[in-house]
Image (cartoon, grey):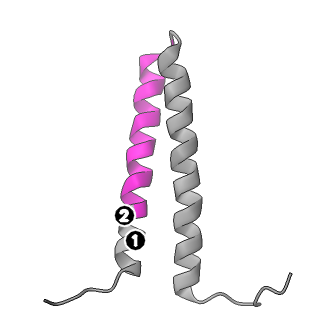
Amino acid sequence: MNAPSELNPEDMLRIRVEVLRREHRDLDDAIHALEGSTSDPLTLRRLKKQKLALKDRIVAIEDQLIPDIIA
């Protein structure tokens, strides 16, 4: 694999967003699995909070990647 030795900051942010999206999907799957069973409501609430926090981080990073356009 011919990967560059250093990534620029924008590429690092894009990779971070992808990792966070994967974590978000994994949490979503876990939440759906727990909702189907009789599980602890506190655990569900914690997972949902984690999912929301991940979404907030994803949006914040995407805002850094998208340039401001003054119209």
Question: As drawn, which residue projects farthest toward the front?
Answer: 71
- Discs 2, 1 touching: Cβ within 8 Å: yes
Residue 54 highlighted magenta (yes or no) = yes
In the drawing, does residue 70 fall left or right of residue 48?
Answer: left
Mark 1 nearby-residue class (10 Å; few <14, some 14–19, many ≥20):
some
Mark 2 nearby-residue class (10 Å; few <14, some 14–19, many ≥20):
few
Three-letter residue code for mark 1: Glu
Where's residue 29, x and y in %?
Answer: 55, 34
Q: Is residue 40 above or below residue 12?
A: above
Residue labelled with disc 1: 62
Element under disc 1: helix
Image: magenta residue range: 39-58
Point out the image quarter for the N terminus.
bottom right
Question: As drawn, which residue projects farthest toward the left?
Answer: 71
Q: Is residue 52 above or below residue 46?
A: below
Q: Total label count? A: 2
Residue in the image at 58% along x and 42% along y: 26
Q: Give the Cα distance between marks 2 and 1.
A: 5 Å
Main SS of residues in magenta: helix
Where's residue 31, x and y in %?
Answer: 50, 30
Q: Is residue 44 above or below residue 67?
A: above
Residue labelled with disc 2: 59
Residue 65 highlighted magenta (yes or no) = no
Point out the image quarter for the C terminus.
bottom left
Three-letter residue code for mark 2: Val
The image's mark for residue 23 is: none
Where's residue 20, x and y in %?
Answer: 53, 58
Question: As drawn, which residue projects farthest toward the top?
Answer: 38
Where's residue 64, x and y in %?
Answer: 38, 78
